[in-house]
Amino acid sequence: MTSRASPDPDPEPAPEPDGPEPGDGGNPEDDLEELYENTPCGQLSSVPGGRIVKVNTTLLDWLGYRREELVGRRTFSQLLSVGGRIYYETHLAPLLRMQGRVGGIALEMKAADGSRLPVLVAASVREGSGGRPALVRTSVFEARDRRAYETELLRARQEADRERERVQQLATTLQRSLLPPALPDIPGTELAAHYHTASIDEVGGDFYDLFPVSGGRWGFFLGDVSGKGAAAASVTSLVRYSLRAASASDPDPVRVLANLNTVLEHENHGDDPRFCTVIHGLLTPGEHGCELTLAGGGHPPALLMRADGTAGYLHTPGGQLVGVLPDAHFAATTVRLAPGDTLLLYTDGLTEARAVHTDGRRREREGGRYGEEALLDFAAGLAPASAADAVTAVGALLEGLGEGVDDDTAVLALGVPVSRKAPETPGTPEAPDGPEPFRSP
Amino acid sequence: MDVRRKNNVTVTGREDGPVVMLAHGFGCDQNLWRLVAPALAEEFRVVLFDHVGSGRSDPSAWNEERYSSLEGYAQDVLDICRELGLRDVTFVGHSVSAMIGVLAVLREPERFAKLVLLTPSPSYIDEGGYRGGFSRADIEELLESLESNYLGWSAVMAPVIMGNPDRPELGEELTNSFCRTDPRMARVFARTTFLSDNREDLAGVTVPTLVVECAHDTLAPREVGSFVRDEIAGSTLVTLDAHGHCPQLSSPGPTAEAIASFARAR
């Protein structure tokens, strides 16, 4: 036991300089003092200004200080590493003042020889008259092993964070490889697309593309492969190349889909069958607009927004899911886009998004989903809209639905711009303000 | 976004009183003013808020880029002023918020009547003849310190603490529940706080300014207070006989009095 070096303003039980040895049945006062001095944690008392007024033997031994070097001379925060001191001043001291106690604070103390002692600290305030803090009592627990373990945990978490970033990077790269880097320029037609990623950790199965085929025409598609992740991505890749390859030899949408159906159906022999929904189309540029032929395979209907401000779904009746049945049926429909008309293709990430009314009620009618009806209302409110405006509006809609969008969503819009020189007047020759438009074959 | 919710703005005090806006520094939230605000409320309209990333601010409003610079926080101060239609504001910035106030005043001087810089430091890092009190290595050590203390922070608790502004009791039940911050946001704020250098900005301050320092501040050496006073033309320096970096907690009476008498003077 160490004798006390200086008078003590801390009104703790008074020490007996040469008390009896522990366990010899001495009086309880002595035992308490012995306990204070040699208890297996450091004890320290300080006045609110910070000055240390009492410290126990355990802490002195840990830090290698003599009592008289600390009591009345140093503050607790001066015994901390610089980082610890800032933490103490910005976090611990305010907390202590507001709550009266803090616990489980990790700090590093500086020993007399300059070495560091990782500790866990708990402290409480003893109030004096008028509720003002009179004394701060601090208990210090040695935490060398625990800190080493925590450092390992921290490192493991940082490693995990880095891995996750890599996975996200990989998913993003893979996703990008499944979409065209940019849409081509088709004179007399305006194109816009948007891909909404629901999860940055996983590749979605949505896809779209638009590309030239024979006779000055263009093939395009938008669809959704079942499932997510790498397996779905590999099927998406297969679907995309099959559609493009089939279009190269015969761009007729029904035959392109039949071809894809055969390819997928042949693939589906394992225990992880994949299928997809898709709309495939053929765009034929004309004098004052273009003609679109669409074939659908189990996909939500395209939305047509007319120059006159009306909107409606463009159904492709009877189109079956692609890749399930050996002889699936697909049907085509043809539509003409005049200046001011825009066709919007989308995947069901949009219509299946969990949605709430503006007043906070869930949408009951569509099973809590955004739904095709709401989308039609949205399109009617939007029409007439250019392709770019339509895609921007749908992008904002998806943003607004926030976390309700739990699946990826692809959007592709094809529109015929209103001629600037002769706006909305059917039959007026189109102003040649761009490159020579493609002619209908 | 709703600025009141974003910054957890609270307004107390005399409705027709002159506006005093209290801005907390790094490490805590508007709770830091709890001993000073009631005294000011008798005379002033007191506006309190949490910086985004602190206290009960809206965590979804946080983004690393914006809040990696004090300009981002200063813009929030101006947004709050605009949203609440505040004019002739006496802005009181503690610690890093002192510099946030300086930046806000530089951008829209017409909005502010006065500036109170409470234990300010335009730069915490020693450089050449300037003594900020710390080296770069010290600050790295602080960041480690933060890191080890946030092991106790769990992602499960985060929404409980930050996402239930309407059910504050959820947060109160936790130990050390004040001043809990998402570690990622705290790290960015720590870096921004301790690595920013705003010494050059001081000279541009044109509104009447009061500098309040603590005689025994453990984070800012005494010469920093005089440095700030010398750089801002016409400013006055008051030294409180207080310990630590938070005089609004260690000496709330004198701190409130210093703010009030300066804010009330014509």
Image (spheres, coloured by chain):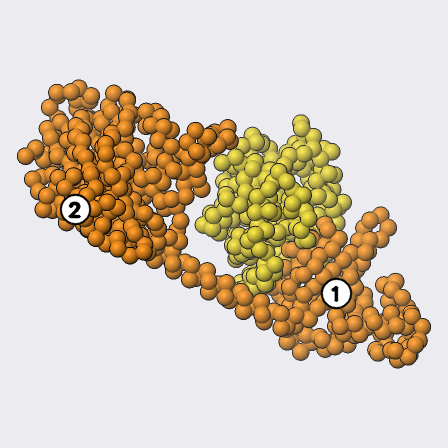
A320 or B52: nearer the viewer: A320
Q: The orange chain is which one?
A: A
Distance from Cα at disc 2 to Cα at disc 1: 76 Å
In what element is the residue under mark 2?
helix
Amino acid residing under circle 2: Asn
- Left or right: where does residue A9 sit relative to residue B200? right
- Left or right: where does residue B167 sit relative to residue A68? left
Amino acid residing under circle 1: Ser
Relative vertical location of residue B170 with respect to residue A142 in this rendering, above or below: above
Q: Which chain is yellow?
A: B
- Left or right: where does residue B221 sit relative to residue A75? left
- Residue B109 seen in the figure: no
Relative vertical location of residue B49 with respect to residue A341 in this rendering, above or below: below
Which residue: 66% across, 61% down?
A: A105
**Residue at mark 1:** A139
Relative vertical location of residue A123 with respect to residue B157 in this rendering, above or below: below
Name the outermost residue toward the right. Answer: A27
Count up the numbered dots. Answer: 2
Tell me where residue B194 appears, x and y as whole percent. 55, 57
Q: Earlier in the sequence, mark 2 or mark 1?
A: 1
B61 or A206: nearer the viewer: A206
Say which mark, if any, is on residue A259: 2
Q: Label 1 lies in what chain?
A: A
Relative vertical location of residue B119 with respect to residue B206 in this rendering, above or below: below
Q: Label 2 lies in what chain?
A: A
Q: Quadrant of residue B110?
A: top right
* Quadrant occupied by the N terminus of chain A: bottom right
Which residue: 19% across, 38% down?
A: A330
Tell me where residue A127 appears, x and y as whole percent. 82, 53
